[in-house]
């Protein structure tokens, strides 16, 4: 059986799955219930200064039949009394001594930081997460992302915390910045033990077109909120990768953003995270999702022969390269498997209007055909095809040659002008512009046995 336990910058946890600081970690009741269900750790809903929340607070992005592909909130930090939260932290730690309980904190002055770190330490928290990420409400009061976007201030606050902290300190980063590595480096300079990312992305999820106000609506008005959920995973993965690859950051990373199942968690881990945090999925589906997460992760580790999480932390990083280091000799081409095709012809439309006019329709069949000499191997048709593995992208080069743009520049073989024989796209066929106009198309395409949708009455 693989060992799922982790030691994250000194914080021990029976598995890498933590609940992120958010409504699911608002109370001892919820956290005990989550631990009982199988979660390894929880980052308590951020403790700090007194706040008052508004109603309503959440907005969602639904995509076709899927609800909450994206989720947005204008909620603040914990609005419960600090003393209640601290008492419940103590209670949870007593009942679950081997689980990770991390206090998320956000205050303003040096004295306030010292006080709240000491109080949470005394309550038995295993570590701290400094919330420098909240992109609404708290930043207007000089906290949250207002700090996360200013590396010097962030570093200074981390230094204040390190003056009194006897437990590991995680700095939670805001994605609302052009280069995530800058605050990560500032966290390191300040002495932090780890970083976590991402917090929510500043956003407006939609506008009520009758009330003329953004969601969520508060008495006819709205405000920008923080975006999270499955839609943000690609942004989170890229930022986790940027921090993990940076040679000077070298801090354990807790990956957050769009994690809904074991596979999402594995992706974060492969790009450098050694613990993962979940918010939206727990709010959407409840704590029970942890069962699929742990069993799926365990099975993945068995299949791959990994004994511990650390066997695959960052394993994909060597394969994430700058574009100029990719092999330009590698070629793939679309291949339509006629026996699977349902004849929807989405691939034809996509390639015809959105790519390289490399798919033709043939009279007498609804199965389209690839025009091999035009296919650049962009993937678009295989991405739009609704049938699994109906269009595969098959390798067509011999696999023996390898040259990158960087190597071509160094060797002086990179094209420097458009009519250079070596320039990309030079010998690539494109239709004459007038061929776009109805029957004219035929006249300008000698030798191309093409049948158009219009001709087939489509
Ligand atoms: C309603 C709501 C409240 C949140 N409150 C906090 C908070 O108090 N402190 C914090 O650090 N992050 C907070 N977050 C951000 C989450 O911890 C997490 O970083 C973000 O939701 C991305 O993860 P996800 O895609 O799994 O939701 C909140 C998120 C939501 C949706
Ligand atoms: S998109 Fe797929 S199923 Fe539809 S016509 Fe093309 S190959 Fe066939
Ligand atoms: S891979 Fe791109 S160019 Fe080739 S057929 Fe598909 S959409 Fe067209």
Image (cartoon, grey):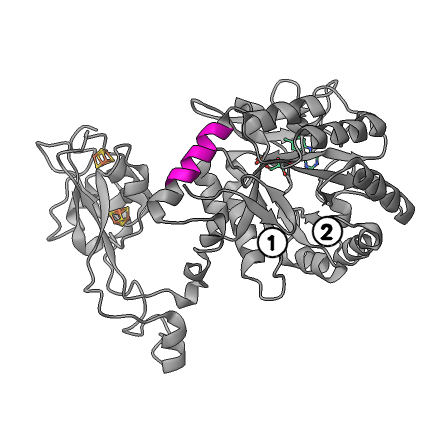
Which residue is denoted by mark 2 in the rendering? Answer: 149
Magenta-drawn stretch, dominant element (helix, strand or loop): helix
Which quarter is ligand 2 in? top left
Q: Is residue 326 visible in the rendered structure shown here?
A: yes
Residue 90, percent from left and from top: 76, 31
Residue at 66% over, 56% down: 184
Q: Is residue 245 above or below residue 225?
A: below
Q: Pick whichever, 372 or 448, lies toward us.
A: 372
Residue at 22% over, 41% down: 391
The reply to whether the magenta stretch includes residue 312 is no
The reply to whether the magenta stretch includes residue 297 is yes
Quick one: label 1 or label 2, which is nearer the N terminus? 2
Count of residue discs: 2
Q: Pick whichever, 200 or 101, lies toward us.
A: 101
Q: Is residue 98 above or below residue 11?
A: above
Q: Which residues are magenta?
A: 290-299
Q: Is residue 76 visible in the rendered structure shown here?
A: no
Q: At numbered mark 2, what does the secondary structure look like: helix, strand or loop?
A: loop
Q: At numbered mark 1, what does the secondary structure look like: helix, strand or loop?
A: loop
The numbered disc on residue 252 is 1
Picture quarter with the C terminus: top left
Picture quarter with the N terminus: top left
Residue 183, percent from left and from top: 69, 56
Q: CA distance from mark 1 to mark 2?
A: 21 Å
Q: Is residue 180 above or below residue 277?
A: below
């Amino acid at each position: 059986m693989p060992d799922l336990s982790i030691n994250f910058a000194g914080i021990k946890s029976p598995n890498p799955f933590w609940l992120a600081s958010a409504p699911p970690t608002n109370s001892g009741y919820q956290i005990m219930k989550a631990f009982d269900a199988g979660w390894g750790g929880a980052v308590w809903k951020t403790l700090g200064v007194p706040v008052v929340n508004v109603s309503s607070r959440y907005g969602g992005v639904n995509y076709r039949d899927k609800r909450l592909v994206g989720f947005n909130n204008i909620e603040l930090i914990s609005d419960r009394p600090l003393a209640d939260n601290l008492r419940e932290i103590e209670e949870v730690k007593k009942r679950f001594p081997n689980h990770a309980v991390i206090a998320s904190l956000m205050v303003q002055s040096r004295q306030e930081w010292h006080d709240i770190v000491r109080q949470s330490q005394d309550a038995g928290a295993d570590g701290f997460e400094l919330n420098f990420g909240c992109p609404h409400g708290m930043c207007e009061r000089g906290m949250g992302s207002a700090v996360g976007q200013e590396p010097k201030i962030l570093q200074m606050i981390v230094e204040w915390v390190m003056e009194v902290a006897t437990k590991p300190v995680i700095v939670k980063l805001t994605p609302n910045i052009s280069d995530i590595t800058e605050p990560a480096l500032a966290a390191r300079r300040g002495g932090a033990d780890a970083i976590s990312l991402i917090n929510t992305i500043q956003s407006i999820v939609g506008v009520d077109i009758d009330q003329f106000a953004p969601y969520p609506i508060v008495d006819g008005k709205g405000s920008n909120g923080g975006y999270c959920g499955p839609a943000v995973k690609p942004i989170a993965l890229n930022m986790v990768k940027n921090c993990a690859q940076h040679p000077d950051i070298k801090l354990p990373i807790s990956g957050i953003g769009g994690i809904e199942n074991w596979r999402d968690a594995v992706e974060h881990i492969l790009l450098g995270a050694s613990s993962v945090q979940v918010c939206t999925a727990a709010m959407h589906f409840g704590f029970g999702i942890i069962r699929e997460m742990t069993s799926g992760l365990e099975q993945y580790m068995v299949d791959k022969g990994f004994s511990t999480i650390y066997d695959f932390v960052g394993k994909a990083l060597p394969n994430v390269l700058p574009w100029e280091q990719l092999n330009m000799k590698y070629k793939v081409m679309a291949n339509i498997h006629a026996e699977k095709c349902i004849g929807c012809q989405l691939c034809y439309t996509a390639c015809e209007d959105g790519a390289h006019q490399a798919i033709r329709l043939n009279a007498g069949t609804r199965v389209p055909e690839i025009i091999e000499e035009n296919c650049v191997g962009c993937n678009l048709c295989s991405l739009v095809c609704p049938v699994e593995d109906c269009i595969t992208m098959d390798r067509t080069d011999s696999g023996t040659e390898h040259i990158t743009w960087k190597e071509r520049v160094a060797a002086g073989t990179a094209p420097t002008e458009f009519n250079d024989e070596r320039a990309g796209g030079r010998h690539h066929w494109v239709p004459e512009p007038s061929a776009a106009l109805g029957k004219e198309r035929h006249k300008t395409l000698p030798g191309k046995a093409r049948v158009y949708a219009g001709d087939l009455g489509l």
